[in-house]
Image (cartoon, helix red, strand yellow):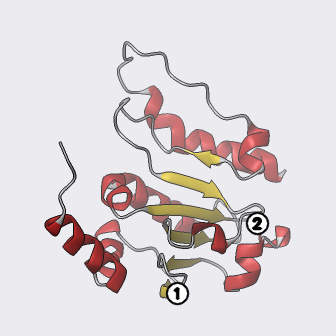
Amino acid sequence: MRHVLILILILLIAAPASAQEPSAAPEPAAPEPADAAAGEAVAPDMPAPDTPALDIIQAGSHRLDEYLWLARPLVVFADSPRDPRFLQQMEYLKERPEDLIARDVVVIIDTAPSARSPIREALRPRGFSLVLIGKDGQIYLRKPLPWHVREIVRSIDKMPIRRQEVRDRRLYPPPR
C-alpha cells in the first residue's frame, strides 16, 4: 500500500512535466516505483537540459550526516502523503524551486511514520513538521505548518554559512 501511495505522489509531482512542450532532447525515463521507495532522488518537474532540478528525496535509509557541509536538508514530515498540510507544502516548493536550488537545498520527505527512518528517529516529529537544517548540521527552523519558499529562503539567508557564501561569491566571482 505504501508503494502505491509513493507512486501516486511521484505521479502528482511529475504531472506538470507531461504538459510541457516536447524538447529536441529525449526525456529521461520516469523513476521506477521501487527506486522511489528505496529513497532515490525524484525531480518534481522535468527541467531544461542546462537547468538543475530540485532534489526531492524519500527519507528511506538516508541519514542527515550524508548532507553535512554539502547541502541544506529541508525535511518535510507527515503522517500520510494525503495530509493536506503536506500537499500544500509540496505545492509551495514547486512554485519557486530555483530559489532553493541556488541555496543548495535538498528536500527530504517522510510520510511513513511506521517505517521509522533514521531521519525521523533523529528529529522526532509529531504529525506534519517542516525542519530546516543548515550545512553545519544544526536545526535552524521547526514549523508545524507549511511555509512559503520566500519565508524559507529568508531563514536560510540569515544563516552564518550562507552569509559567508554570499561574501565569497562577491569577492571571488566564478570564471566565465
State the residue lying farthest toward the left.
170
Residue 176 horizontal side relative to residue 6, left or right: left
Q: Are marks 1 and 2 in contact (CB under 8 Å)?
A: no
Q: How many marks?
A: 2
State the residue lying farthest toward the top.
24
Question: At which x and y percent is residue 28?
Answer: 55, 25
Residue 33 horizontal side relative to residue 28, left or right: right
Q: Residue at x 34, y 77 (%)?
A: 156
Q: Amino acid at mark 1?
A: Gln
Q: Amino acid at mark 2?
A: Ala
Residue 157 shows up from this direction: no
Would you call the spot at circle 2 few (<14 residues within 10 Å), some (14-19), or many (20 or more)? some
Quarter-of-image position of residue 11: top right
Residue 129 horizontal side relative to residue 91, left or right: right
Frontmost residue, 173 versus 115: 173
Question: At which x and y percent is residue 70?
Answer: 50, 65
- Helix or strand or loop: what does disc 1 sit on? loop
Residue 123 shows up from this direction: yes
Question: At which x and y percent is residue 152?
Answer: 36, 74
Question: Disc 1 and disc 2: Cα gap in Å?
Answer: 24 Å
- Helix or strand or loop: what does disc 2 sit on? loop
- To which residue does mark 2 refer? 112
- To which residue does mark 1 refer? 138
Depicted 89 relative to depicted 13: above or below: below
Q: Residue at x 62, y 44 (%)?
A: 10
Residue 166 horizontal side relative to residue 2, left or right: left
Depicted 13 relative to depicted 28: above or below: below
